[in-house]
Image (cartoon, grey):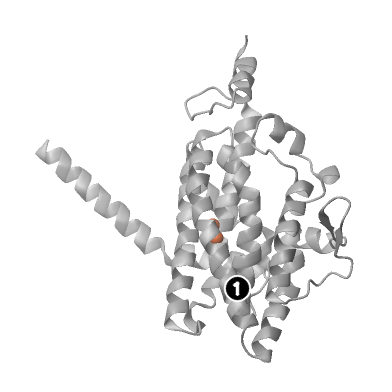
Amino acid sequence: MDQTERFQAIVDAEEKIEPTDWMPEEYRKSLIRQIAQHAHSEIIGMQPEGNWISRAPTLKRKAILMAKVQDEAGHGLYLYSAAETLGISRDEMLRLLHTGRHKYSSIFNYPTLSWADMGAIGWLVDGAAITNQVMLTRSSYGPYARAMVRICKEESFHQRQGYEIMLTLCRGSAEQRAMAQDALDRWWWPSLMMFGPHDTASTHTEQSMAWKIKRISNDELRQQFVDMTVPQADYLGLTMPDPDMRFDEETGHYRFGEIDWDEFWAVVKGDGPMNRERIAAKNRAWDEGAWVREAAAAHAAKHAAAARRSA
Ligand SMILES: [Fe+2]
Ligand SMILES: [Fe+2]
């Protein structure tokens, strides 16, 4: 058995690949791309919600939103650490993000226009994220799988808090219900886009399945999300912004209309409503945080020198 066969045998036996194990170069590259993109999404995803922390309607809502945004920072940090075990540094990943060569989830290139968007993001965006991420807890790469177990627990809290905001608005005044409907109208289609292109147009799927980096296809995951979410919208008394949405008795699934793929590709390629602002804000935060990184490095060097002296 050669290295490649031994590697595939470990994967097929549902055992984990660990950082010191031999792995095909393409497996390593493809995981770096996926985990870094995931980490970047967590970090860039702090911006649209961070935008509402200072305007949360109550102290309690503010505390919950701050905790959620901090969770997302934590997710980013676990994921950067997981990617570093594959031999890329955090500085390098950030450089690739800051210069636009690494991608993050396009959903964060849409603006947050009202408080109801905090509800819609938790409910739909975190909901779509969990649908995608549950399979990643069984990823063949050990550090990624383990990071995802913890992340998924927190994401389900995020989804619940978002739905609870929507429920509160939907039980409120006519104006509040209209805010909730407007947020659903704006976030629904971008949430469906989070699952990526159709299976027929998806380039990495087959190899990722064989390597157990991915286990369920984009279209299947999207369908799971729709089937889970439509009854939740019904319970809220909201209307899905899709005239083609209907329950198909025969298959037991909801049928839905076609995604606007022109919009999808425009946002992926950098022309979404907020792409430039998100990257500019990220670069600004990086530059303004330089003194913190320098101070932390100086502090660590001082401690290391003191430890050497006493040794
Ligand atoms: Fe997250
Ligand atoms: Fe989240």
Q: Which residue is mark 1?
A: 119
Is residue 235 visible in this depiction of the protein?
yes
Residue 163 vs 22, above or below: the answer is below
Mark 1 neighbour density, 10 Å: few (under 14) some (14–19) many (20 or more): many
Local secondary structure at mark 1: helix
**Most distant residue in the front direction:** 249
Along the horizontal axis of the image, is 284 left or right of 214?
A: left
**What residue do we see at 87% from left, 56% from top?**
249
Write down the quadrant of residue 248 in the picture.
Answer: bottom right
Q: Position of residue 227 (x, y in %)?
A: 75, 57
Q: Position of residue 310 (x, y in %)?
A: 10, 39
Along the horizontal axis of the image, is 229 left or right of 311?
A: right
Is residue 104 visible in this depiction of the protein?
no
Is the C terminus in the top left, top right, bottom left or bottom right quadrant?
top left
Write down the quadrant of residue 160 in the picture.
Answer: bottom right
Q: Position of residue 228 (x, y in %)?
A: 70, 58
Q: Quadrant of ligand 1?
A: bottom right
Foreground residue among 65 and 112 = 65
**What residue do we see at 75% from left, 59% from top?**
226
Amino acid on which disc 1 is placed: Gly
Foreground residue among 63 and 230 = 230
Is the N terminus in the top left, top right, bottom left or bottom right quadrant?
top right
Q: Position of residue 144 (x, y in %)?
A: 53, 40
